[in-house]
């Protein structure tokens, strides 16, 4: 994965970042006086015991593919129009307990006003997500279902409190891109999905034979609407 600094003036060399680990917050000896450490994670909020719609719905896996993640710098030592691009792809199961931390990087001090990331189709032919940007699996009343989509789109998120900013000042900060699946399932009743082709799997996608295309569009919109920025990885 490449770390790219896009600037309107001047130039700066930043550390290369790798998925899951690039530097340690316990060892700041490599930091310059104008740098801090940022950890970015991603996860999904989901309560397994909650009743959903007219049927019992349970989720097992939620795979997403981020093409890149971008940090927009509102105010910093290099000017107000700078940003930092972290090139992926970042492919992650948001329901896995071991997948929260995506990136651990050294970045310039400053005030970062939002995080932007881009959904894109996976190009990894060995991946479950090949040709897809997200995939959600589980069961509806004991019958397996799969929701997938292949949309490509940039999403910008910031803190719910508009006065709160991500500030790096020679310290370590943690932020999480959180997908609130409880809120998604409260908005969209996927128990309405049908298995029209009778293959034993309820498929919800933009290109399926089960008649659930409208439900797939509603799920995509609900997921996009229920993404938030949180303070830490806990």
Image (tube, grey):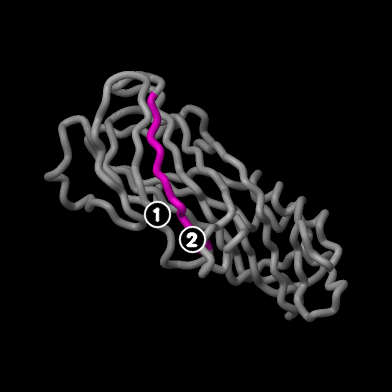
Query: Tag 2: Cα neighbours inside 10 Å, few (<14), some, or many (≥20)?
Result: many
- Judge whether 16 appears above or below 49 on screen: above
Magenta segment: does it hold 161?
A: no
From the viewer's side, name the closer residue of 69 and 96: 69
Looking at the image, residue 25 sits to the left or right of residue 181; the answer is: left
Specify the segment rendered in magenta. 82-94
Quadrant in which residue 141 is drawn:
bottom right
- Identify which residue is drawn at 68% across, 56% down: 149
**Residue of label 2:** 92
Q: Quadrant of the C terminus?
A: bottom left
Residue lying farthest left? 29
Which quarter of the picture shows residue 87? top left
Q: Position of residue 69 (x, y in %)?
A: 45, 43
Residue at 38% from the left image edge and 35% from the top image edge: 84
Q: x%, y% of residue 52?
A: 74, 65
Asked if 89 appears above or below 4 in the picture, the reply is below
Q: Which mark is residue 102?
A: 1
- Circle 2: element type: strand
Point out residue 54 in the picture as x, y percentages from the top left corner. 82, 68
**Dominant secondary structure of the residues highlighted in magenta in the image:** strand
Residue at the spot 85% in from the left edge and 79% down from the top edge:
198
* Picture coordinates of residue 188, whole percent (x, y): 76, 55
- Compare residues 1 and 36 and report the one nearer the observer: 1
Q: Residues within 10 Å of mark 1 (few under 14, many from 20)?
A: many
CB under 8 Å between callouts 1 and 2?
yes
Q: Residue at coordinates 56% horizontally, 62% vertically from top-left? A: 63
């Amino acid at each position: 994965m490449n770390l790219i600094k896009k600037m309107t003036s001047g130039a700066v060399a930043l550390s290369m970042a790798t998925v899951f680990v690039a530097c340690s917050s316990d060892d700041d000896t490599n930091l310059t006086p104008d740098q801090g450490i940022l950890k970015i994670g991603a996860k999904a909020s989901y309560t397994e015991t909650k009743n959903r719609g007219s049927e019992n719905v349970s989720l097992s896996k939620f795979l997403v593919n981020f093409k890149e993640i971008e940090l927009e710098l509102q105010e910093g030592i290099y000017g107000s129009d700078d940003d930092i691009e972290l090139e992926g792809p970042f492919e992650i199961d948001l329901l896995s307990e071991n997948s929260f931390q995506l990136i651990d990087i050294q970045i310039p001090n400053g005030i970062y006003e939002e995080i932007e990331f881009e959904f894109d189709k996976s190009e990894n032919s060995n991946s479950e997500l090949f040709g897809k940007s997200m995939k959600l699996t589980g069961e509806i009343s004991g019958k397996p279902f799969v929701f997938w989509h292949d949309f490509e789109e940039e999403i910008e998120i910031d803190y719910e409190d508009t006065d709160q900013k991500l500030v790096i000042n020679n310290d370590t900060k943690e932020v999480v891109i959180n997908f609130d699946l409880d809120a998604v399932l409260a908005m969209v009743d996927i128990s309405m999905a049908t298995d029209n082709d009778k293959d034993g799997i309820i498929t919800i996608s933009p290109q399926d034979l089960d008649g659930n295309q409208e439900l797939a569009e509603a799920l995509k919109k609900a997921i996009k609407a229920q993404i938030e920025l949180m303070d830490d990885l806990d």
